């Protein structure tokens, strides 16, 4: 009891409540079984990617040494009939192998191409410009992954234009042609034709006036 006869109350601070909206949600974690499954699947993917490049290298050797020539007249026929590969896909594999060989020899590239889509964007870049294009893609990506879209943007300025591609049409300047002097001369010719009452000449002059007024941007 206190001096004034009232019981002394003990104050206990309340338990802090974490703000549910401000608190970060717990990160989902994989179970040991799922982690095991992920590791196996990633191993398959990595092996498959390695095989993809190995296949390209093998096709490149067959193509360069013409090892198909005993039974097939062309490399394309060999790929189609012997291997079941279409011409574009076979050459994409070869192109990827060439790009990979070139990039692997450059020591100062910290990130190498990692998938078929990235290689495909580099295949059409001239060989002497590929390293520059790839470094440009890495720079564009910054801290983000280097996607095929980024490689496409970086490589676009190095790719040669496709033959037969129509050139961009020049937009009209918006300036009207000054046909005032021509219209004045036409008016004199019309007066002369009216005096002579030559209907044929008047008809031709009328057609000419419509053409000139259209060119001048005037309503007939």
Image: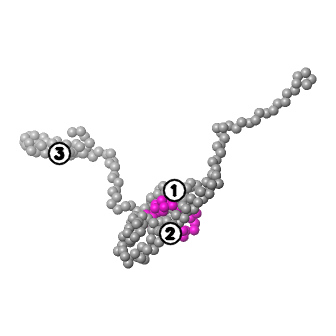
Q: Name the residue under label 3.
A: 208
Measure the alpha-carbon separation of dots 1 and 3.
60 Å
Measure the alpha-carbon separation of dots 2 and 3.
72 Å
Nearer to us in this view, 7 or 214: 7
Nearer to us in this view, 215 or 52: 52
Assign a secondary structure to mark 3: helix
Q: Range of the magenta residues?
A: 104-127
Q: Residue at x 41, y 76 (%)?
A: 67
Quick one: label 1 or label 3, which is nearer the N terminus?
Answer: 1
Measure the alpha-carbon separation of dots 2 and 1.
23 Å
Quick one: label 2 or label 1, which is nearer the N terminus?
Answer: 2
Side (left or right) of 22 relative to 214: right
How far across and how far down the image is residue 199, in percent? 8, 42
Q: Quadrant of residue 1?
A: top right
Observer able to see residue 174? yes
Side (left or right) of 206 relative to 32: left
Q: Mark 1 points at which residue?
A: 147
Q: Name the residue under label 2.
A: 54
How far across and how far down the image is residue 63, in percent? 42, 73
**Extreme front residue here?**
33
């Amino acid at each position: 009891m206190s001096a004034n006869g009232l019981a002394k109350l003990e104050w206990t601070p309340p338990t802090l409540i974490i703000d549910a909206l401000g608190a970060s949600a717990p990160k989902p974690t994989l179970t040991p079984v799922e982690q095991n499954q992920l590791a196996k699947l990633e191993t398959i993917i990595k092996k498959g990617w390695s095989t993809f490049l190995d296949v390209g290298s093998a096709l490149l050797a067959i193509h360069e040494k013409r090892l198909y020539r005993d039974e097939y007249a062309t490399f394309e026929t060999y790929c189609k009939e012997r291997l079941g590969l279409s011409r574009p896909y076979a050459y994409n594999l070869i192109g990827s192998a060439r790009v990979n060989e070139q990039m692997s020899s450059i020591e100062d590239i910290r990130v190498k191409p990692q998938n078929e889509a990235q290689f495909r964007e580099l295949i059409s870049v001239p060989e002497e410009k590929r390293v520059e294009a790839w470094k440009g893609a890495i720079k564009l990506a910054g801290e983000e992954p280097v996607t095929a879209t980024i490689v496409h943007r970086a490589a676009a300025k190095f790719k040669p234009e496709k033959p037969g591609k129509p050139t961009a049409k020049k937009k009209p300047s918006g300036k009207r042609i000054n046909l005032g002097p021509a219209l004045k001369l036409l008016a004199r010719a019309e007066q002369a034709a009216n005096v002579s009452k030559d209907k044929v000449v008047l008809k031709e002059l009328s057609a000419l006036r419509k053409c000139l007024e259209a060119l001048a941007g005037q309503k007939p």
